[in-house]
Amino acid sequence: MLYIKEHQIQKILDMINGKIPEDPVLQDMKAFFKEEFGINIFDYICERARTGLLRMRIVVWDGRDQRPFFCRPDRELENMIKDRFSRACREHGLNTEYYDPKDYFSVVTPLKHEVEQMLMNKEMMNKISALLRTFPEVKSHRFSIPTVHVFYATDADIENYEKNGLSKKISDAISDLLGSVPGLEGRRMGDVRFSSLEEFEGRYKGNFYGFWLDH
């Protein structure tokens, strides 16, 4: 996963809250993504990958917005994005290294995970732990920041508690604890995944690293 740096996140939040203006390239790309894909974007990031190649990242909200662009071997959508981005850069005289679409590659990356990671500090994890202890059905929990792994007793419990609404109640309670970030009100935070001790202790012998790799 490509991580968004803290100062890049802060820039996005400052734009959302009107503290700094959007540049005209971003305005053009916002209109393009909305018209072509029905997706709202937050920003673009120009940078170099570890290999030294030029990269342009489009920042969307979450994996659902990212999915249409993920692992497209034909590169059709990537080329569309690059062509439009390069044209916008030329028209507005910005990001001169990106005038030619052949000089860089482009990816679409989500913001939600990064914002949740900012919110998931030690105090928040203690609050979530205290909350989960109020549910007797929850037998254990672990954190792989920002994900909260909640363990019921058996595999059957996972299905039963999803059907009776308990899992949604737990997810909503964690989301309420996380709250929201100014400018992102209305966007629910929290990545809660439900598993069982039956699987964790049986299949993974209590090894959380092995479990985490599969989940």
Image (tube, grey):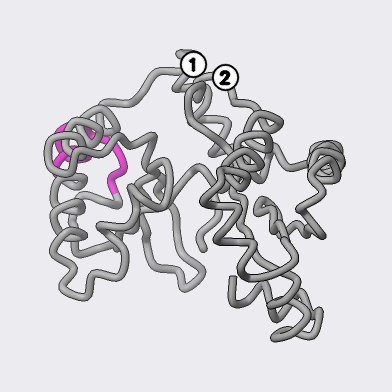
Q: Please, what secondary structure does the residue beneath circle 1 have?
A: loop
User: Which residue is denoted by mark 2 in the rendering?
Assistant: 182
Total number of numbered discs in the rendering: 2
Closer to the camera, 78 or 191? 191
> Height in image: 6 above or below 28?
below
Magenta range: 87-96
Which residue is under mark 1? Answer: 17
Dot 2, how many residues are within 10 Å of its Cα: few (below 14), some (14-19), or many (20+)? Answer: few
Task: Give left or right: position of 69 versus 13.
Answer: left
What is the quadrant of the C terminus in the image? Answer: bottom right
Q: Is residue 181 magenta?
A: no
Quick check: 7 above or below 49?
above
> At 50% across and 25% down in the image, what residue appears?
184
Mark 2 and mark 1 in contact? Answer it, CB < 8 Å. Answer: yes
The mark nearer the N terminus, 2 or 1, is 1
Percent of width and height locating residue 127:
83, 36
Q: Name the residue type under label 1.
A: Asn
Q: CA distance from mark 2 to mark 1?
A: 7 Å
Q: Secondary structure at mark 2?
A: loop
Q: Nearer the viewer, mark 2 or mark 1?
A: 2
Q: Main secondary structure of the magenta part?
A: helix
**Would you call the spot at circle 1 few (<14 residues within 10 Å), some (14-19), or many (20 or more)?**
few
186 in relation to 158, above or below: above
* Along the line of sight, the residue nearer the viewer: 6 or 202: 202
The kind of residue tagged 2 is: Pro
| Residue 97 pos. (x, y %) | 30, 52
Q: Which x, y percent locates residue 54?
A: 37, 61
Side (left or right) of 71 relative to 102: right
